[in-house]
Amino acid sequence: MGQLLNWSHVDEVVLLGLTERPLLQNIIFIMFLVIYILNLLGNSFIVVIVLLNHNLHMPMYFFLVNLSFLDICFSSVTVPRMLQSLLTHERRISLKACLMQMHFFHFLGSTEVLLLTAMSYDRYMAICRPLHYVASMNVTVCLSMALGSWSTGFVHSLIHTLFTSQLPFCGPHRVAHFFCDIKPLLGLACTDTTFNVRLLSLLTGSLVMASFLLTLLSYMLIGLTLLQVPSSAGRMRGFSTCTSHLMVVILLYGTALFTYLRPVTEESLQVDQIAAISFTVFTPMLNPLIYTLRNKDVKKATRGLLRLLMKL
């Protein structure tokens, strides 16, 4: 019993990061710093441009603002701490801070999955039921869907955090990752973690798979509707409103399903780092590029804002 109490009083862990080579650390630091700045600028731009332009005050852009704000928070949970570690070579983090980072990572990550599902439903209503779109996607419905995504994501992450925090941890307290995630932390536990692993697969796997299947169903119905459009130009216009969202869905779901539905092994943890870089560093930066480069409304609003700024 006394030994168990000693295990539970571990107060810090060591994040090993991506590499121990000084030259690679410097290269990674510069690259990730630039990407993080672009992420902040790009997603902040989308939030500002939508809020300032009344023509963009529609359900689609309401969810896009949520997604951009979420991407800023999501990457900020892991990237600044990783940049600090690369710059100062300080890899220690308190256990409480580690659990908090894990909580916010899964909170914001699962919220993003649910928000993308809400956005796919919005596209389904706009294309498959256009006459009911305004009534169905009113302010109350949009707020409820967004609030439901954020609250469900919070509860989902809270369950994992509570069960993980109850585990007794023992040495050497070294986490083979650049941030605190559930699977690497379970490797430090001095007890059987079968329940936690099954909970991760069941809870996170069910949330991701359910969201993925609902998104897939929306796009199947959208595809069937567009096939009935007589003109190829009409089909392309309808499809063009979905391509940006579809690209983001593929990027996120591909890495999320790959990471959290596989068994925990030493080799899988190494591969998970690569997948984690994709959805914590690159995807949040790519989202604003995807939505601005392929969206005529956003580009039109951007030109209008630039003309206004030039007159000032």
Image: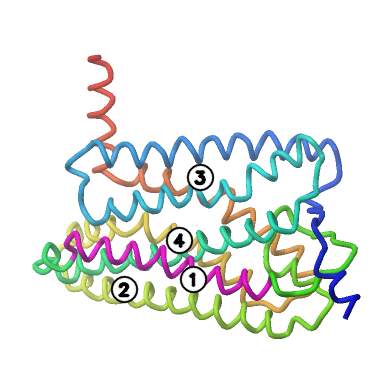
Q: Secondary structure at mark 2?
A: helix
Say if mark 2 contacts mark 1, CB within 8 Å: no
Position of residue 227 relative to residue 76, above or below, is below
The tag earlier along the polypeptide, 1 or 4, is 4
Magenta residues, start to end = 137-164
The residue singled out by tag 4 in the image is 112
Label 1: which secondary element: helix
Is residue 64 shown above or below 35? below
Task: Compare marks 2 and 1 and give the one earlier in the sequence.
Answer: 1
Residue at 26% from the left image edge and 28% from the top image edge: 305
Q: Disc 3 vs disc 1: Cβ atoms closer than 8 Å?
A: no
Asked if the residues shown at circle 3 and circle 2 are in contact, with their CB atoms under 8 angstroms apart, the answer is no
Residue 153 appears at what percent x and percent y?
A: 47, 67
Residue 285, label in figure: 3
Q: How is the image coloured?
A: rainbow
Residue 45, above or below 176: above
> Mark 4, residues whose alpha carbon is within 10 Å: few (<14), some, or many (≥20)?
many
Residue appearing at x 63%, y 45% in the figure? 79
Q: Select label 4 or label 2 by which is in front.
A: 4
Magenta region, main secondary structure: helix
Residue type (three-letter) at the residue carrying disc 3 = Met
Residue 282: % across, % down: 56, 48
Residue at image mark 2 = 218
Mark 3 or 4, nearer chain start: 4
- The residue pinned by badge 1 equals 155
Q: CA distance from mark 3 to mark 1?
A: 26 Å
Residue 228 in the image: above or below residue 59: below
Label 3 vs 1, first from the N-terminus: 1
Q: CA distance from mark 4 to mark 2?
A: 17 Å
- Classify mark 2: residues with Cα within 10 Å, few (<14), some (14-19) or many (20+): many
- How far apart marks 3 and 2 lie (CA) works out to 26 Å
Q: Amino acid at mark 4?
A: Glu
